[in-house]
Image: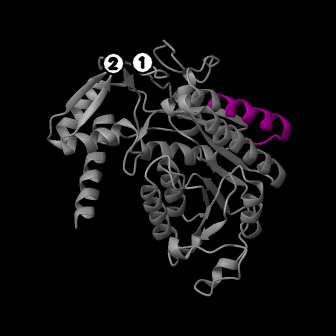
Amino acid sequence: MASQLTRSPSSTIDDSDAMSTTSSSSSANPKDDEVWDSATSVLVTGGAGFVGSHVAEALLARGERVVVVDEVNDYYDVSRKEANLDVLRRAGGDNVRIFRGDICDVAFLEQVFETCPMPRRVVHMAARAGVRPSIDDPFVYVHSNVHGTTRLLELAAKHGSDSFVFASSSSVYGGSKKALFSETDAVDLPVSPYAATKKACELLAYTYHHLYKMNIAGLRFFTVFGPRGRPDMAPLKFVDKISRGEPIDRFGDGSSSRDYTYVDDVVDGVLKALDRPLGYQIYNLGNGSPTRLNDFIKLVEKYTGKNAVIRQKPDQPGDVPRTCADISKAKTLLDYDPQTPFPEGIRKLVEWYQSAEAAAAK
């Protein structure tokens, strides 16, 4: 997957004007040629995506310089990712630099680091997501998740690293029957290629910590949702389809449950993990309170004011019946304290969705 290096340095340059870093400097923004200090900038991979764009936005809000790297693939509607990048340009101005390319492409990354030396702090959110698609094409998951993470770990070890945070997943717990999923649980039996790649990344991260004494935190996200969410995930998909009167697919009898976590709470956990490097750590970032699928659907009906049209489907291969995070470790070590109960998160998601739809209709 060779990459073509293009950069959108700030809000003053549109995507259509994205410049190659190998060309002459742009007169539109003389600051583009400034070489950033690796100690005072943060690398965010996957910054065009859902969680990555929210993390980058939060970093910019607190005054950080942020280097965003994202290949902007078509796993879902690219226009949503472009809109996320526009948010970052408006929020960051000269404090954000955006590069498009594959993190597995060494030549691409070396070019990026010519003008933005490898930051000593890394938030690695880039990954191929989705349990079910990983069953159909496991190879792209190995490439993006395992190869990509290894590449970044190697570069961080080479250039020096103060804090390296990466996205793992609650999927590593497989079909656990435990009431609470703890970081100390054995997670040796993943039930999808996606989960297997995330477990592999955790193992590789420990290896780099052991070899190079790097501070690395793996964050097991529990079903993150909220504004700008992924359209393939149930929260935004259900809000959209129920609002439009279109049928939704309910897999199983509706008794399955998930520990849904509002995006602002997850971002808070990511930044706290970045700011508190503690050797090698794995943290659950969840809400600690699962919601049954049938109750989830009723909440969406309540806040949209529409009745769901339900299409019954069998359970899906690779899905797990229940997730629930034990967040005591993150609370103790990071002061992680999620503030958004699931009903309030759904209300906020519906509010954002209705506002976005109204703006698009103008």
Q: So how many labels did they put on this image?
A: 2
Residue drawn at x 38%, y 40% as measured from the top left: 339
Q: What main secondary structure does the magenta stretch of the protein show?
A: helix
> Splitting the image into 4 quarters, where does residue 142 fall?
top right
Measured in 3D between alpha carbons, the distance from the residue under mark 2 to the one under mark 1, in whole angstroms, is 9 Å
Residue position marked by numbered label 2 in the rendering: 252
Q: Earlier in the sequence, mark 2 or mark 1?
A: 2
Query: Where is residue 334 drawn, in percent x and y?
Result: 57, 39
Query: Where is residue 280 drawn, in percent x and y?
Result: 71, 35
User: Is 209 within the magenta?
Assistant: yes
Query: Observer-nearest residue: 50 or 43?
Result: 50
The amino acid type of the residue labelled 1 equals Pro
Mark 2–mark 1 CB contact (< 8 Å): yes
Q: Is residue 225 left or right of residue 107?
A: left
Query: Where is residue 118 drawn, in percent x and y?
Result: 74, 59
* Mark 2, other Cα within 10 Å: few <14 / some 14–19 / many ≥20: some
Q: Considering only vertical position in the picture, is 188 above or below 116?
A: above
Which element is circle 1 on? loop
Residue position marked by numbered label 1 in the rendering: 321
The amino acid type of the residue labelled 2 equals Gly
> Splitting the image into 4 quarters, where does residue 100 fall?
bottom right
Residue drawn at x 48%, y 42% as measured from the top left: 266
Residue lying furthest front in this view? 136
User: Is 347 within the magenta?
Assistant: no
Query: Where is residue 312 drawn, in percent x and y?
Result: 27, 22
Residue drawn at x 34%, y 38% as measured from the top left: 235
Q: Read off the magenta span.
A: 198-215
Q: Is residue 312 left or right of residue 67?
A: left
Residue drawn at x 58%, y 28% as measured from the top left: 195
